[in-house]
Image (cartoon, rainbow, N blue to C red):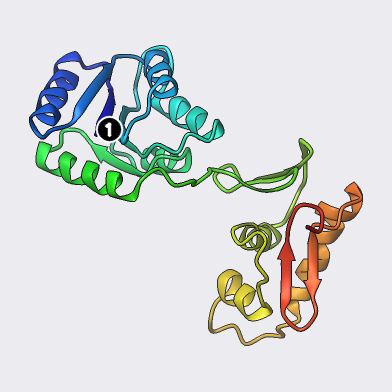
Amino acid sequence: MRVLVVDDEVRLADGIRRGLEAEGFAVDVAHDGVEGLWYARENEYSAILLDIMLPRMSGYAVCRTLRDEENWTPVLMLTAKDGEWDEVEGLDTGADDYLTKPFSFAVLLARLRALVRRGATARPATLSAGDLVLDPARKTVTRGGEPIDLTTREFAVLEFLLRRAGEVVSKAQILAGVWDFAFEGDPNIVEVYIGHLRAKVDRPFGRTSIRTVRGAGYVIGEDGD
């Protein structure tokens, strides 16, 4: 298994490399973000260990670029920053795990093995159906590049549908996923919000991506597909 280590702390990167090689991994090392991105694009890796604070290009930018290019190699972010919002940003840009320095090599190795077991399955940072794109981290929705303003609840309903694009979801599933299991109001509230969404993301663009499946629920696809 080949692993890429991207860290500008030369001694730390070399120590990780030697430790991983002793465990049977093949290891490439880069010391800045641009070099790390080049390695990640040019080679296949089982996982990438990616520092956040890098010269020339941050780890956040490297990770988001890879995900935008549909490179799903598992990414474990390494950082000296231990604020919770730094962790949130790292995971929202597409990282799979987050480890704060200093860390024990045993923990690093266990996290790395867990990522390798999961493999490089698709997990885009944004959700889409055709040219309708929702970014959960940035809380934005666009259609054909044009921004669409949604309320918090409308955004949540659309995100629920997009996470199950192509699948028929029932009113009960939407209520449980967007409101909660104990919701005691009128279940027809779902129809109201579906109507709001159609009025904002479909009709102004001449689209019919949100469809009603009679007696079953709703499905979102590429303009009705």
| x and y percentages locating residue 36 in the rendered image | 37, 19
| x and y percentages locating residue 129 in the rendered image | 70, 50
| x and y percentages locating residue 27 in the rendered image | 22, 24
Q: Is residue 154 above or below residue 176?
A: above
Few, some or many C-alpha atoms within 10 Å of disc 1 (few <14, some 14-19, many ≥20)? many
Residue nearer the viewer, 163 or 188 = 163
* Left or right: 100, with 68 as reference point: left
| x and y percentages locating residue 18 in the rendered image | 10, 23
Q: Quadrant of the C terminus?
A: bottom right
Q: Is residue 17 above or below residue 154?
A: above
**Rendered residue at 49%/46% (across/down):** 122
Residue matched to label 1: 78
Label 1 sits on what residue type?
A: Leu
**Rendered residue at 49%/47% (across/down):** 123
Residue nearer the viewer, 42 or 178 = 42
Q: Is residue 152 above or below residue 35?
A: below
Q: Quadrant of the N terminus?
A: top left
